[in-house]
Image (spheres, rainbow, N blue to C red):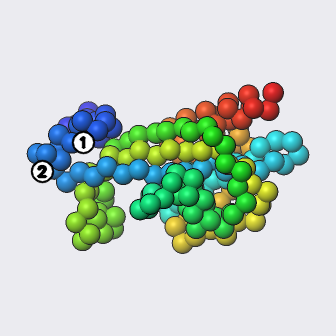
Amino acid sequence: MSLIENFMRVPVIKPLYFLLKWFGFPVIWETSIGATIFHMKEGRREYLLLHYPSGHFDFVKGHVEANETEEMTLRRETEEESGITDLHVFRKRVSICYFYVAKGAEREKRLKQERGIWIFKVVHFYPAQTETRDIRISYEHTGFLWLSYEEALAKVTFANAKKILSETEGYLAKSDA
């Protein structure tokens, strides 16, 4: 494993972030909120997956803006990315953390805005139910799918997304009982 690959596995913890920032590294800590959106079809949950231009499938998510609560961010991002406005948001929160270095257009944009290009990211996801089936995707996506839990688990690209979906389904299945 190369030095870069080892560095990409850094723990996403505040003390390390502050240490790197103190030493002048181009780091930033970001928090986003997402939703594992589902609707019921013939008594079974179908989850909404968004197709991103980079080719991966994932859930609705986005940055918390100034003075927003987590639920406000979730509702705003959901409407912006899918057109869905009728959400019943559950209290269960599943969080993931990861680190990445911005590349390409994102890197250029961040440099122009004088924002960090080494990103420590925390994303909190909430299950959310909708009656809406017709989606209006944003410019950020190239398509969408409604899939059963098993199909969605096979389709999501990243291990973190699989974790989110598994924990969400487990929580909802217990709620059904």
Amino acid bearing label 2: Gly
State left or right for residue 117 relative to residue 87: left
The residue that label 1 is drawn on is 17
Q: Position of residue 36 (x, y in %)?
A: 63, 47
Q: Quadrant of the C terminus?
A: top right
Q: Relative to 13, does residue 147 appear above or below in the rendering?
A: below
Amino acid bearing label 1: Tyr
Q: Position of residue 173 (x, y in %)?
A: 74, 31
Q: Which of the 4 quarters of the picture holds residue 94?
A: top right
Please, which residue is most extreme toward the left here?
23
Secondary structure type for disc 1: helix
The residue that label 2 is drawn on is 24
Give 173 or 154, whichever is nearer the viewer: 173
Q: Quadrant of the N terminus?
A: top left
Secondary structure type for disc 2: loop
Q: Position of residue 105 (x, y in %)?
A: 33, 68
Q: Which of the 4 quarters of the picture holds residue 116?
A: bottom left
State left or right for residue 135 relative to residue 41: left
Give 154 or 29, whichever is nearer the viewer: 29
Residue 57 visible, this angle:
no
**Residue at left offset 20%, top offset 37%:** 3
